[in-house]
Image (spheres, rainbow, N blue to C red):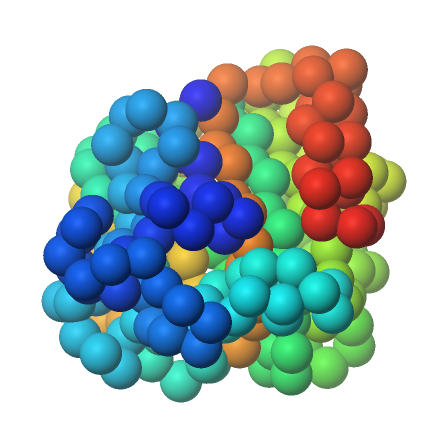
Amino acid sequence: LMLWLDANETSTMDTGASSGAGGVPNNSETVGYWGDRSGNGNFAAAYQAAANRKPTYIATGFNGSLPTLQFDGSLNIMEVQNPAAFDTWDEMSVFIVSEGNSLNNWKTLIGKNGEDGQGWQLHRRDGDNRTRLTFRGTIGADDRDFAYELNDANLVSLVYGDGLRRFFGDGSQKDSITDSGAISAAPNSPLSIGGRVRDAGQRQSYAKSMISEVIVFKSTLADDERQKIEGYLAHKWGL
């Protein structure tokens, strides 16, 4: 387990740039720091601690009644620390609980660049209710498009390794291809949530979405392990 961000644990969040800097957010306050429950210290922080980069904590926003961080789709972005620790992986399992609210086309929900021949990203495709998952540097096709609507309240799972790249939506497999090899490094791009960071430093492709939980493993979870985590998250978030 490399990263665990959880909006249900408000004690892990702060309105300032670091833990204890400004205090735990109240409803409708912005969040500059999101602590990592994995124990690895890979916390997420708003870019340059700028006020206009901070998402807003909503106590009853997700799925109508549950806590979340609202990213505005304009400038809000959270960036995970220790970017080198998330580079050149040849296996990975990612879980994200989110709900797009007017999430526009080609906006990035989570990723490590995903352009410039580097990294990976998950984003909404064009206006046909499809999702695109992009990996750079592996033997499989860079871009995979499939029917899945990120503007719903959903639980997304990505599992890469053992010769496959698979995508699951709400526990159901939506796409699978043969793939292997290390994902190309994105040395100048942190793992980002709510937007994309390019190699030259541009922040862009901001996602207007509520994000409640992110879990990242540097390993390929077996189906029974994946299903246990999906069950835990589905129960917790009413999915």
Measured as percent of width and height from the top left, residue 12 is found at 35, 45
122, above or below 168, in the image: below
Measured as percent of width and height from the top left, residue 18 is found at 17, 52
81, above or below 107, in the image: above
- The reply, left or right, for residue 156 in relation to residue 89 is right
29, above or below 143, in the image: below
Q: Which part of the image, by quadrant, shows the N terminus?
A: top left
Measured as percent of width and height from the top left, residue 106 is found at 55, 74
75, above or below 36, in the image: below
Measured as percent of width and height from the top left, residue 153 is found at 74, 62
- The reply, left or right, for residue 64 in relation to residue 60 is right
Task: Please report the residue visible at 63 percent of the width from the left and 70 percent of the height from the top.
Answer: 61
Q: Nearer the viewer, residue 180 or 218?
A: 218
**Residue 12 visible in rendering:** yes
Task: Please report the residue visible at 63 percent of the width from the left and 30 percent of the height from the top.
Answer: 159
Task: Please report the residue visible at 34 percent of the width from the left and 52 percent of the height from the top.
Answer: 13
Task: Please report the residue visible at 51 percent of the width from the left and 36 percent of the height from the top.
Answer: 215
